[in-house]
Amino acid sequence: EAECAALSQISTKIEIVIQFLEDLCVFVHKPVVVFEDNQTCIHMAPAEVDKAKTKHVSLKYQNVKDAVQRKMIELKYCPSEDIVADILTKALGSEKHYQIMEKLGLVEM
């Protein structure tokens, strides 16, 4: 549920940035690709999920569904081990930390 809530927030922010850039006459290639490692969140976007168990999530997630339907964003699966933002958001072991640093082109000083 937390990842779906975060995805909902980011989709709203992406739409705000797109609108801002378009107001400045900057071309924005749409849909903006959002990489997600939670397949449940990805599968909820195009689906009509009305089950009692996920209804509270569905209400929060409606703006993601709308953004996907309007082709503002596209959700793509990215395995957890390939999510480089983890270096900024999670406490990682040294091996994982250095793997992500390498992917980002960062070097030790």
Image (cartoon, helix red, strand yellow):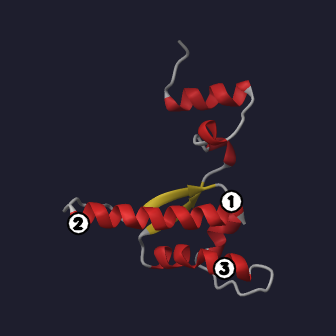
N-terminal of the two: label 3 or label 1?
1
N-terminal of the two: label 2 or label 3?
2
Q: Looking at the picture, how far across and down is residue 81, in whole percent?
A: 68, 42
Q: CA distance from mark 3 to mark 1?
A: 15 Å
Q: In the figure, is residue 93 to the left or right of 71? A: right
Three-letter amino acid code of the residue under disc 2? Asp
Residue marked by disc 2: 23
Q: Report the disc number at residue 38.
A: 1
Q: Is residue 94 above or below residue 19?
A: above
- For the residue labelled by badge 2, is the local secondary structure a helix, a strand or a loop? helix
- For the residue labelled by badge 3, is the local secondary structure a helix, a strand or a loop? helix
Q: Looking at the picture, how far across and down is residue 95, in whole percent?
A: 72, 25
Instruction: Count neighbours of disc 2 (C-alpha within 10 A) and say few if under 14, some if 14 to 19, many if 20 or more.
Output: few
Instruction: Count neighbours of disc 1 (C-alpha within 10 A) and say few if under 14, some if 14 to 19, many if 20 or more.
Output: some
Three-letter amino acid code of the residue under disc 3? Ser
| Disc nearest the viewer among 3 and 1 | 3
Q: Residue at x 72, y 66 (%)?
A: 1
Q: Residue at x 32, y 61 (%)?
A: 29
| Disc nearest the viewer among 2 and 1 | 2
Q: CA distance from mark 2 to mark 3?
A: 31 Å
- For the residue labelled by badge 1, is the local secondary structure a helix, a strand or a loop? loop
Q: Residue at x 65, y 55 (%)?
A: 37
